[in-house]
Image (cartoon, rainbow, N blue to C red):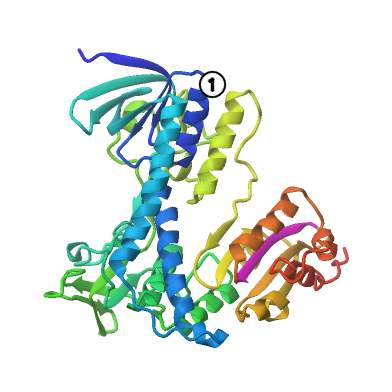
Amino acid sequence: MQNIEQVEYLFLGGGKGGKSLATELAKAGKRVAVVERGMIGGSCINVACIPTKALIRSARVAHTVRHAGAFGVEVGEPRIDMKRVSSRVKGVVDALVDVNLNSFIQAGFDLILGEGRFVGPRRIHVDLNDGGVRVLEGEHVFINTGTHAAIPSVPGLREADPLTHVEAIRIDEIPGHLIVIGGGYIGLEMAQAFLRLGARVTVLQKEPRVAMREDADVSEAIASALNEDGIDVRLNVEIESVSGRSGDSRDPVRVKLANGEHIEGTHILAATGRIPNTKDIGLELAGVELDSRGFIKVDEKLRTTASNVYAIGEAAGTPMFTHASFDDYRVLSAQLRGEARTTRGREIPYALFIEPELGRIGLNETEAAQKGIAVRVAKLPMAAVPRARTNSDTRGFMKALIAAESDEILGFTMFGSEAGEVVATVQIAMLGKLPYTVLRDAPIAHPTLTEGLNLLFATVPARIAK
C-alpha cells in the first residue's frame, strides 16, 4: 500500500493566493506541502499578467518611437526584432520565477512538482513530473488550480491550432495578419500590442460592443481608440467556420462569417473567456461541489462543501485578477488567526492595459441602474486635465458615481493615460469611506493626471432631494 504522508496544510496549485498563504504558514513553522504542475509562482508570473504586460511594454516603446516626430524627435520607422522581444519577455518571467523559487526554499515548505488529484477527503495523489508517486493528506486543504483559456465551439477552430494568450506571449515572429476572436480584456490587449509590433489585426466580437461589462460610453471610446490605431474592430459578428492552420504559411487561416464574408489571416487568437481547472481532479471524491459553470462552490469564508477544504482564486469564482487572489489569501490568513475577515462586500479594482488605459473600481452606471441605486454622475474629458495636454494624450474621460442622498463615492471609471494608477487614489478614498469632497478639495500636485480628480469631483451635481 502506498505510504500516505501527513501534513498540516496541503495546497493543490500554487497561484498567487495559495503560494502566499503556504509561505506564511511554512515560515511560522507549520508542515506545509504545495502540489504544482510546474509553473513556479503561478500563472500570473508564467503566462498571464507579467509576460503580457512585458510584451505590451515593448509594443508601447515601438509605438512611441513610431510617433516620436509629433514631439519634435525624428528617429524614423522602428525595426522590430520579434525574437528579441520574445527573449525579453522570457527574461522577465525567468527572473521572477527565480525570485519565487528562492522564496519557497527560504520558507521551507515542500514543493511537489507533478499532477495532483483527489483520491479521497483531503487526500491527494501526485504523479511526479520526474517519475514516481506521492500521496499526501492534509488537516487543511486548499484548492488553487486556476483557469485556462476557452476555445469556442466553432467548426474547425480547434483544428486550426489557435493561439491563446499563452502561445501569443511566446511567439517569435510578427504575424502578417492576426485575427482575434473576442473583444474582452485579453483580446483587446493582445490586439493592440501586436498591431504596434507590426501586425495587421482584425478583432471579431460577437457582442454589440467590446468590453461588455463596461458602460456603453466606455466601450465606444475603447473601440474608437483601437480603430484610430488601425485595428479593424468588427461587432455583432457570427463566425460560421474556420479552416487552415494558425502560423502555417502553406495553409493560411480562413474565417467564414455568417454573412458569407471570408477573412484570411496568418494567425488566429482565441480570447473568449476562461474555464476553471476543476475537471478530472477528483473533486467528487473529496466531497467538493461545483456550480453550474464548473467553479468550486464556496461561502464568504472561501470554505467548500467539504470539511476543512477551501478554494482560492479563479477556480473559486473569485474575480480573475491576481490582486483578487491575493485578497483571498488575506481572508484565509485572517481566519486561521481567528479573525473575522470575509469576501463579503469587497470591491476589486482592475485595469485594462491598452492605450489609453481603463481603470475601474465599484459601480458603473449600468450596474447602478440594474440594482436600482440612485446616483449622481460626474464626468470629465481628459482634455480638461493639464497633464494630459502636456503629454499630448487627451483621449478619454473620467467618470464618478456619487450616492444620490449622501457624498459617498460608489464607483469610478477612467479611460485615459495611466488610469490604472489614478484609480488607486479613488479606491483608497472609498475604503476609508471618505466623501467625494475630500478628493475635490485635496491639494493634489500639479500638473499630474491624478489632479484631474479635483476637477472631476468639482462637477458633481447637487444632492437629490428626498
Measuring 51% from the left and 87% from the top, which residue is drawn there? Answer: 69
For residue 344, what is the image quadrant?
top right
Q: Nearer the viewer, residue 260 or 314?
A: 314
Q: Quick one: label 1, few (<14), some, or many (20+) residues within 10 Å? A: few
Spot occupied by residue 180 in the image (x, y as percentages of width and height): 34, 71
Residue 443 within the segment the image draws in magenta: no
Q: In the rendered image of this protein, does residue 128 appear above or below residue 185?
A: above
Instruction: Label 1, secondary structure: give it.
Output: loop
Report if residue 83 is visible in the image: yes
Q: In the rendered image of this protein, does residue 46 appear above or below residue 5?
A: below
Q: Is residue 161 left or right of residue 234?
A: left
Q: Quadrant of the N terminus?
A: top left
Spot occupied by residue 103 in the image (x, y as percentages of width and height): 45, 34
Magenta residues, dominant SS class: strand
Spot occupied by residue 211 in the image (x, y as percentages of width and height): 49, 68
Disc 1 marks a residue whose amino acid type is: Ala
For residue 272, what is the image quadrant?
bottom left
* Bounds of the magenta segment: 408-416
In the rendered image, which residue does mark 1 sit on? Answer: 28
Query: Which residue of the protein is positioned furthest toward the front in this rendering?
Result: 74
- The number of discs equals 1
For residue 172, what is the image quadrant?
bottom left
Report if residue 292 is visible in the image: no
Q: Is residue 302 left or right of residue 136?
A: right
Q: Quadrant of the C terminus?
A: bottom right
Measuring 34% from the left and 51% from the top, which residue is drawn there? Answer: 148
Spot occupied by residue 352 in the image (x, y as percentages of width and height): 52, 64
